[in-house]
Amino acid sequence: MKKISFRRLKDISVTKKVYFIVGTMAVLILVELLTLWFSIHTLSSVRALVGAEGLWSKAQKDAIYQLQKYYSSHDEQDYTAFKNFMSVPLGDHKTRLELIKLEPDYAIARQGFVEGKINPDDIEGIIQVLRRFHNIYYIKRAIKAWTDGDSIIAQLIPMGEQLHNEINSAAPSKEKLDAIIKAIGPINHSLTIIEDDFSYILGEGSRWLENLILEILFIVALTVEITGLLLSISVSRSITKGLNEVNRAANKITQGDFSERAAVFSNDEIGQVAMSVNQMTEQLLKSNKELEQFAYIASHDLQEPLRMVTSFLGLLEAKYNDQLDDKGRRYINLAVDGAERMRKIINDLLEYSKMARKDYDLEDVDMNTLMNDVARLNQTRLKENEVILEWKDLPTIKAGRTPIFQVMHNLVGNAVKYRNTDVKPHIKIEATETPEHWQFSVADNGIGIDPMFYEKIFVLFQRLHNKTEYSGTGIGLSICKKIIENHKGNIWVESVPGKGSTFYFTIGKQ
Ligand code: ADP
């Protein structure tokens, strides 16, 4: 059950999540306020009950006092005062009898308390406390004391009447009057004990209630706080988790790793963003593949007609050389040059699209051996230009041999091509190890590269020189970049123009 509601919370929209938290908090705070209101109300009613008990005791004490006064003064006014005071416990008595009924007549109960001189504003509250909590220990005992007291107080009425009759008789007997007044003593005494018990037990009860209310309020407040905190933490965590995931995947994709996907944790807006990012990548991957396919097919299919153009140009030159004037021969030469350049571009493009296809196996490649092969392939150029090419203790890496050979061949080739004619070319290859990858550097003392072109040179067809200065297609470094990225690595350059450049690339160990 808990799991289902949690899953639902995760999948509802962010706005609804916020509404949910605010709504839950509002309901909990309302519950807390209602508890507070009910507690204060109950507590003040119990306090009023304590006050009512005070009135009840005092009235009964005053009544006894008036009776004793009447005994000595024989003044009718004192007897009237006695009866007046007696109306208080009698009124309360009326209420008590009504309240113990199964279906009390509340009008009678209220009237009783009015006669008991209780403040009308307190009556309702006291009646509720007595009805609702009559089973609570303290109230039960208080009612018991009240009941006991009532039966004793009731004895005072016939006594008062006897006294009144005797005093108003033709010849009041002193002995009889003494006997009546003497009987009041023990009644008064037992009433005092009951009253003490009554007020003590109500005092205890109200202190107990006070503590209970404080505890309840504390628990309710704590529940509100904890629920709010837990809800906020869980919702904000799920939002952060989703956003971080989208961020992580988007970063990887930006770096060119189109195989990356964002995990979808929820069905809310954030989950939908993650799904959109994934769909976008899917689309990107598809159009990338299409482009690579196009480049491959185009460059592949262009080779044949180009070969035809070149061979017919050759035939033209061989067969009609004698009949052509200088101009004609120059035109043919220019056409042959153009065709040759085109062949190079097509070959490089084909190479580029082959590398993009990633159709090679990972194997252990000893970079020292590989460098030997690179040096052998470039032997003539290196010798011609008196290049010092050096490397030492290179590692064995897990890579595609052909593509990595291509990278080294391109970088060394460029280092020779873009040499500084004032100094003897010196190319140094080194490798350093980090926990996750190998980092290679190919350093030269050539013409260098302005830092503003550090990124540009890795873009397809981007060159910093025209073809008369340095021959080339502007594809070599793009091929290197593609290969290194396919190996989950990075490639970049650092250079001091005029002093030399160092190309770095990393290859993951796995
Ligand atoms: P290409 O060499 O065919 O022009 P590349 O993609 O290999 O194409 O190189 C792109 C550009 O980067 C080159 O035109 C050149 O300006 C610059 N470059 C490459 N390697 C070096 C280097 N070692 N020193 C200086 N410039 C370089």
Image: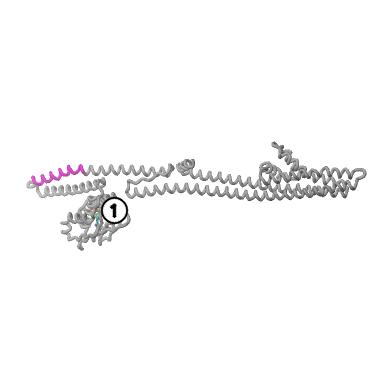
The prevailing secondary structure element of the residues shown in magenta is helix
Give the x, y percent position of residue 346: 21, 46
Instruction: Report if residue 447 is visible in the image.
Output: no
At label 1, counting other C-alpha atoms closer than 10 Å, the crowd grade (few under 14, some 14-19, many 20 or more) is: many
- Quick one: SS at disc 1? strand
Verify whether residue 307 appears in magenta: yes
Instruction: Report if residue 329 is visible in the image.
Output: yes
- Quarter assignment of residue 170: top right
Give the x, y percent position of residue 444: 24, 60
Ligand 1 appears in which quadrant?
bottom left
Residue closer to the observer: 302 or 164: 164
Can you identify the residue that label 1 sits on? 507
Type of amino acid at the residue the image marks with label 1 = Ile
The residue located at (21%, 55%) in the rendering is 369
Give the x, y percent position of residue 260: 34, 46
Q: In the image, which residues are magenta? A: 300-320
Verify whether residue 148 appears in magenta: no
